[in-house]
Amino acid sequence: MGEAKRRKELGLPPREKKIKQKEKKAGFISNLSAKYPFLPFILGGVLLVVLIVDLVNYYK
C-alpha cells in the first residue's frame, strides 16, 4: 500500500512537498578570496609599501 492511500484512509492531509531552496551564489569578493586565499596579504603588503613611500617622500 502506498503512502498516499494510507494517509487517505487515516484521514490525514497529503504530505507537503519539500521545496528546495535555491543556493545563494557567492559574491565576487567571496569567490575571489576562496580562489586566492593569499590575496589579502599581498594587497596589505602593497598598501603598506605605498604608505611608507608616501611618508618618506612627504618628509623630504
Image (cartoon, grey):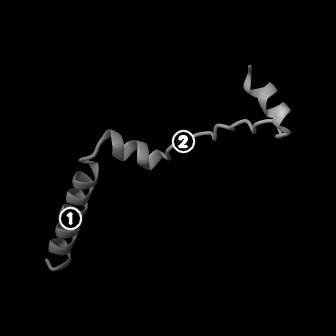
Is label 2 in a helix, a strand or a loop? loop
Query: Where does residue 32 sit, x and y in percent of width and height?
Result: 38, 43
At 74% from the left and 19% from the top, the residue drawn is 1
For the residue marked with disc 1, what is the amino acid? Leu
Crowding at label 1, few (<14), some or many (≥20) Cα neighbours within 10 Å? Answer: few
Q: Quadrant of residue 12?
A: top right
Task: Give the x, y percent position of residue 58.
Answer: 20, 77
Q: Between 47 and 39, which is closer to the camera in this rendering?
A: 39
| Residue 19, above or below 56 | above
Foreground residue, 35 or 15?
A: 15
Q: Quadrant of the C terminus?
A: bottom left
Rendered location of residue 54, percent (x, y)? 22, 70
The amino acid type of the residue labelled 2 equals Lys
- Per the image, the residue denoted by label 2 is 25
| Residue nearest the observer in this picture, 19 or 23 | 19
Q: Which label number is shown at residue 48?
A: 1
Looking at the image, residue 9 lies above or below residue 29: above
The residue most toward the bottom is 59
What SS does tag 1 mark? Answer: helix
Instruction: Give the CA distance from mark 2 to mark 1.
Output: 32 Å
Rendered view: 4 above or below 11: above
